[in-house]
């Protein structure tokens, strides 16, 4: 069997302070690239391109290293690490950002190490579209590149975002962002319109309601893993994308069945992500647990 | 093959005036019992217990009659028919009630005709819990009775509602109602708590995101049928319940596979309901179309 391809993720590495109805979790390991990587690493080798400050704890670096994540692209710069602080509502479905300090992430101009430029599967986590475009320019033209985005960029960086989307193979976004981006209220029509802007694959994230995969002409609705245990939803979307991209790497193909397996494994990864603060649960979990959740999901979807 | 059992529905028959981004539909045939019946009739004989006023058009009666619905329990009383008027937001997910006139429905005290008292499958559409309880008292004790409810009754008729729920085999309610009823933010935990109040089967409706079936220890998440064509969402929940109960009647059993098939056929029925105003689409559709949507849903859920 040939070695499974790597997944490259470019995004934030952060120190998060999160308050949920279950507890207060100060200065935890966070950031989109971290949640993505800790999910994807169960399925493929993961290369992480990001930046941290002088205050970034060695223990966090050790955790990522011991999880097998390639940190050759993680730069440590003078200054402080990106910090985010937020508070979740009682039902865990909405959150309030209490503070954001970009710190060293503010000037992050990602340069892909030479040895990583041939990466076949790349995830551009949420960030300024201009920065995401600059990364895209450093990649081989036949890579499968998926990006995430958010309402802020739709409102403030429309032209760069549209240019980016036109060059992507995949886009992950949530339902309200899809509506905002396309001006279309119906989510199926919105997903189709996003595809028409460029990416063949669209992952429409619907939070506690799951996700809908658009792949070519196919529409695959996927429920969330039904869990009563939600401790900290932070990073659910990134761990979902991480499981998805990791499972694509592992399978080495992007047929509809492979994409479907990937989206269910992404769902399984996200369900683990939310069961503990930070990436604690994804750090403790093993591949067998993810497979067990995948099988449980399959059985739920078709109990006959 | 023995004749499939009847489904009895008790609920409102109305004249609805609906405004959606797709159009204005005045004085259409509506009401919870009507949407339920027009879905269920594709799978089973349907008995409709309700009341209309002197103004109720003959054409609507003919439509129901020609759809094969048994109208022996539909009383015509002096006065006007129940009227509801509402307007949907751009994304079709929220609506504003513009006016409600209960009219003859205000004094509706349902009396089940003697010949219908042995009905095996009964749906108590949304109404005052005291009225729903009064219907329950007229039924055989081994009937499978499912009810629908709404936030109004949770807020204003708590004791009667809890007494009702304790005697039901099934309860249909939407996600915000489940949260309000149980005080539980997590939907899986909320569904479990509703089951603990009495009904073995809980149908948690999530609008455009589908539904979750709780049946004994099983949890079955079901997506909505992905459609770009939403003309009028009115009655989606009732047609969903109608397809579900009708399909249970048709199958003659309530095993998990039978419940799963029923919930997918309910999803198919709801998708037809919303594609045209009133029950126009459910009136034109045939059993083969519902089966085709069921098969399409199955294929989407497991494309391998």
Image (cartoon, coloured by chain):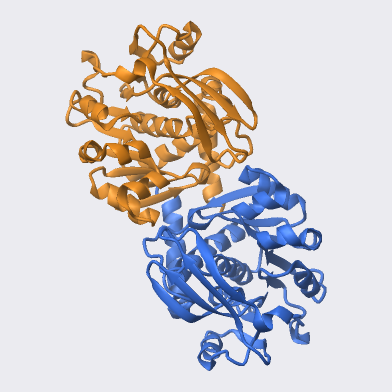
Chain colours: A orange, B blue
Quadrant into which the C terminus of chain A falls: bottom right
Residue A189 appears left or right of A26: left
* Lateral position of residue A247 relative to residue A20, left or right: left
Rendered residue at 23%/41% (across/down): A162
Q: B264 and A227: which one is in front?
A: A227
> For this rendering, which residue is in front, B21 or B166?
B21
Position of residue A278 measured from the top left corner of the image (x, y, whole percent): 53, 23
Residue B263 appears in view: yes
Q: Quadrant of the N terminus of chain A?
A: top left
- The answer to which quarter of the image holds residue A91 is top right
Residue B246, image x, y percentages = 60, 71
Query: Residue B89, image x and y in percent?
Result: 44, 61
Could you say which is closer to the camera, residue A81 or residue A117? A81
Placement of A55 over or under A282, stated as above or below: above
Query: On screen, B238 above or below A21?
Result: below
From the top left corner, tell me how far across and down residue B224 is, in percent: 48, 57
Residue at image position (57%, 24%) is A277
Q: Nearer the viewer, residue A290 or A50?
A: A50
Q: Is residue A89 above or below residue A12?
A: below
What residue is drawn where x is 70% and y is 61%? B170
A60, above or below A296, in the image: above
Q: Is residue A129 left or right of residue A274?
A: left
Q: Is residue B213 visible?
A: no
Q: How many marks?
A: 0
């Amino acid at each position: 069997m040939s070695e499974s391809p790597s997944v490259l993720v470019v995004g934030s590495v952060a120190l998060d302070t999160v308050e949920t109805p279950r507890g207060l979790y100060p200065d935890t390991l966070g950031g989109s690239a971290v949640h993505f990587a800790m999910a994807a690493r169960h399925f493929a080798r993961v290369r992480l391109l990001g930046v941290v400050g002088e205050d970034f704890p060695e223990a966090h670096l050790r955790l990522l290293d011991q999880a097998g994540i390639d940190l050759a692209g993680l730069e440590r710069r003078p200054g402080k690490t990106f910090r985010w602080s937020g508070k979740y509502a009682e039902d865990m479905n909405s959150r309030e950002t209490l503070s954001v300090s970009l710190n060293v992430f503010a000037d992050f101009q990602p340069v892909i190490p030479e040895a990583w430029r041939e990466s076949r599967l790349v995830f551009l986590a949420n960030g300024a579209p201009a920065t995401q475009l600059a990364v895209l320019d450093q990649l081989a033209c036949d890579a499968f590149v998926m990006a995430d985005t958010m309402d802020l960029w739709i409102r403030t960086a429309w032209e760069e975002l549209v240019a980016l989307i036109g060059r992507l193979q995949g886009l992950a976004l949530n339902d309200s962002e899809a509506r905002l981006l396309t001006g279309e209220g119906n989510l199926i029509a919105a997903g189709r319109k996003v595809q028409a802007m460029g990416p063949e694959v669209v992952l429409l994230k619907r939070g506690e309601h799951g996700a809908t995969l658009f792949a070519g002409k196919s529409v695959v609705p996927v429920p969330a893993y039904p869990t009563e245990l939600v401790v900290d939803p932070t990073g659910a979307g990134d761990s979902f994308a991480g499981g998805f991209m990791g499972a694509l790497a592992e399978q080495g193909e992007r047929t509809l069945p492979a994409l479907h397996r990937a989206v269910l494994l992404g769902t399984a990864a996200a369900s683990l992500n939310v069961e503990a603060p930070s990436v604690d649960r994804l750090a403790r979990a093993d591949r067998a647990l993810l497979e067990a959740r995948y099988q449980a999901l399959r059985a739920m979807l078709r109990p006959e």
